[in-house]
Image (cartoon, helix red, strand yellow):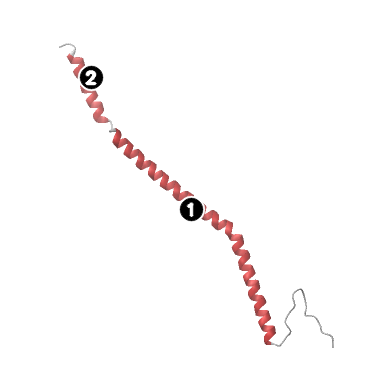
């Protein structure tokens, strides 16, 4: 009977401690949910950084393309105006060449 009392007390203490701890399945589930949320947040951050980086890298090329399009549109307007006024077409590299009479 003397040996049973400590064993019963130890068993009761073990039951009390077991009731306080979460089961391993609950711990794994909670940890996996936290990890999943952290990974999703990191994915969103990386995606935003990639989009911003791509836009920043493309901006100079977009500006250059816009400038060239504006220049081409200006040149076309000048050529159309000159043609409407009966002027000779411009020659690449300078003024139109003169013809000898």
Is there CB contact under 8 Å for labels 2 and 1? no
Q: Quadrant of the N terminus?
A: top left
Mark 2 neighbour density, 10 Å: few (under 14) some (14–19) many (20 or more): few
Q: Quadrant of the C terminus?
A: bottom right
Residue lying farthest top? Answer: 2
| Image: 62 above or below 25 | below
Label placed on residue 48 = 1
**Label 2 belongs to which residue?**
10
Q: Provide the secondary structure element on which disc 2 rests.
A: helix
Q: Provide the secondary structure element on which disc 1 rests.
A: helix
Q: Tell me which residue sits at (20%, 22%) in the image.
A: 12
Mark 2 or mark 1, earlier in chain: 2
Task: Return the residue nearer the eye: 91 or 87.
Answer: 91
Q: Is residue 19 left or right of residue 74?
A: left
| Image: 27 above or below 81 | above
Q: Tell me which residue sits at (41%, 47%) in the image.
A: 40
């Amino acid at each position: 009977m003397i040996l049973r009392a400590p064993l019963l007390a130890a068993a009761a203490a073990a039951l009390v401690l077991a009731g306080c701890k979460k089961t391993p399945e609950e711990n794994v589930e909670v940890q996996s949910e936290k990890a999943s949320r952290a990974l999703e947040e990191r994915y969103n951050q990386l995606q935003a950084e990639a989009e911003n980086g791509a836009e920043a890298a493309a901006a100079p090329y977009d500006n250059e393309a816009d400038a060239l399009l504006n220049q081409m549109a200006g040149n076309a307007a000048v050529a159309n105006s000159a043609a409407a006024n009966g002027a000779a077409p411009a020659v690449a590299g300078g003024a139109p060449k003169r013809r000898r009479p």
